[in-house]
Image (tube, helix red, strand yellow):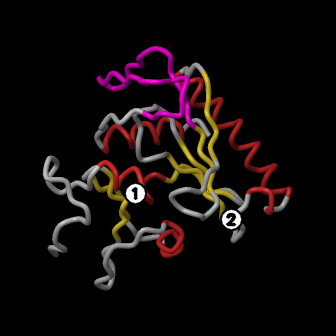
Amino acid sequence: MNRGPLPYQSSALPGCATASWVLERILVYKFLEGEDMVTDYADLYERKFFIICFVGRFMDYEKLMIRSYEFWDLKLHHEQALLGRHLFWYKGEESDFFDIPGEAREELTRISKLTKGIVNEIFSPDKWNYVCAGNRTTHLHWHNIPRYNEPREFCGYTFHDVAPHTLILPNQKVDDELVLKVRDDIKKRL
């Protein structure tokens, strides 16, 4: 089904949104019952059928699932320029971290430490950033972002963290097979 051009389409990158639009939000498309563009993860997550579009690439978001816990779903982040980047998606309704039950915070701490240890073992990041901003979606989620002072090699690719001592994230395209390989490497160690 042809749905026409993306909003704010870039002429330099046909089929891709302009950088300013991508920085503002990740475009999410759902192809179910003829519904058009949706820009909120929470609505789509509940239905468990959606595709994320970022810089002209589509990936089935459910393929990024690593493991589900009582309060959180652990997912690999679709952008793997920072190897091992992952997030925890809260299963409850609260949108503020300090409003969730203590058990949910304890579970996040426990599984975050476990996952951090696994990523440390596989990729040896030099430090970590932790982000719970809620800027692109208000549904509560938590990012664990490994940072690298030196390039890393993985599956024939070289990964460069362009500014490891800032919040600037690299924009390196990685194919879906490599993303799923990272997911599987983490998953098998849990």
Q: Which one is nearer the viewer's eye here, 55 or 69? A: 55
* In magenta segment, residue 144: no
The stretch in magenta equals 145-169
Q: Secondary structure at mark 2?
A: loop
Left or right? Give the position of 16 relative to 81: left
In primary-sequence order, the first of circles 1 and 2 is: 1
With respect to residue 2, does 168 lie above or below? Answer: above
* Residue wearing tag 2: 95
Q: Position of residue 22 (x, y in %)?
A: 36, 52
* Res. 58 mark: none
Furthest toward the bottom, the residue is 33
Q: Amino acid at mark 1?
A: Ile
| Neighbour tally class for label 1: few under 14, some 14-19, many 20 plus, Cα within 10 Å | some
Q: Position of residue 32 (x, y in %)?
A: 33, 79
Q: Amino acid at mark 2?
A: Ser
Q: Position of residue 101 (x, y in %)?
A: 83, 61
